[in-house]
Amino acid sequence: MPGGNDKRVQTITSSNVEDAYARWAPIYDNVFALIMRPGRQAAADAVNRLNGRVLDVGIGTGLELPMFSDHVKISGIDLSAPMLDIARRRVADLGLRNVEELRVMDAMNLEYADHTFDAAVTPYVITTVPDPARTLDEMVRVVRPGGEIIIVNHIGAESGPVCWIEAAMSNRAAKLGWRPQFPWSIIGDWIAARPQVELLERRTLPPLGLFTLVRLRRK
């Protein structure tokens, strides 16, 4: 995959992810809801400017679901059944009628036909999948021409204290269920190799610029 020769790209498997998020599921919202809220809101704001059907790839416990406008129809997929169980309860408790379905599914093998959706969004997921390039390819495949792919994620620091912390955590990637070190080149090289995709926006987000919003368009 692009960026695969970078020594900072840690190996992770689907089994690692399933095991990790089965452990995270009961406490995920308490641990991550606050720090990740600005990024989820930024992703939802980008989606809410659009219309039609949107695929949420790696929807987890569904923290962003209440942030989507009613006019956007959401389908959510995730590899973790325990995380999706919480998302389903959230949909029922909040009466979110714009959520069309929630399904256990592998982001690297989406069970949807080409051009099924008007857009795809993936908050805090691209560092958790074994093959980011394949996941991005799948999202492009299921989005119609002219549709957007919206990514929010941590992009690894190139230097300084944050980079040192990420390096110290990198040997725990399999246990954590995500890669603490994730260079921009993985996404940047993928975009450069695909003429059917154009970069619309890339900007850092709070808190402290830890996360990045990326908007892509399928030409």
Image (tube, rainbow, N blue to C red):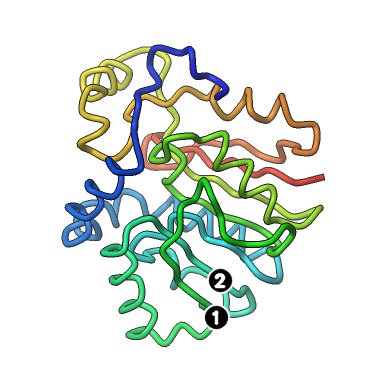
Instruction: Identify the amino acid type marked 1.
Output: Asn
* Residue matched to label 2: 74
User: Decide: marks 2, 1 in contact (CB < 8 A)?
Assistant: yes
Q: Residue at x 56, y 71 (%)?
A: 74
Up-down relation of residue 170 to residue 85 (above or below)? above
Q: Percent from the top left, x then y, of residue 139? A: 62, 49
Residue 19 at x, y = what percent?
A: 22, 48
What residue lies at 32% left-to-right and 18% top-to-bottom? 163
Task: Answer with the quarter of the image where residue 134 lies.
Answer: top right
User: In the figure, residue 95 lies in which quadrant?
Assistant: bottom left
Please give left or right for residue 166 compared with residue 2 in the image: left
Q: CA distance from mark 2 to mark 1?
A: 6 Å
Which residue is the site of mark 1? Answer: 98
Tell me the residue at 35%/26% (across/down): 11
Left or right of residue 115, residue 186 in this image: left
SS for callout 1: loop
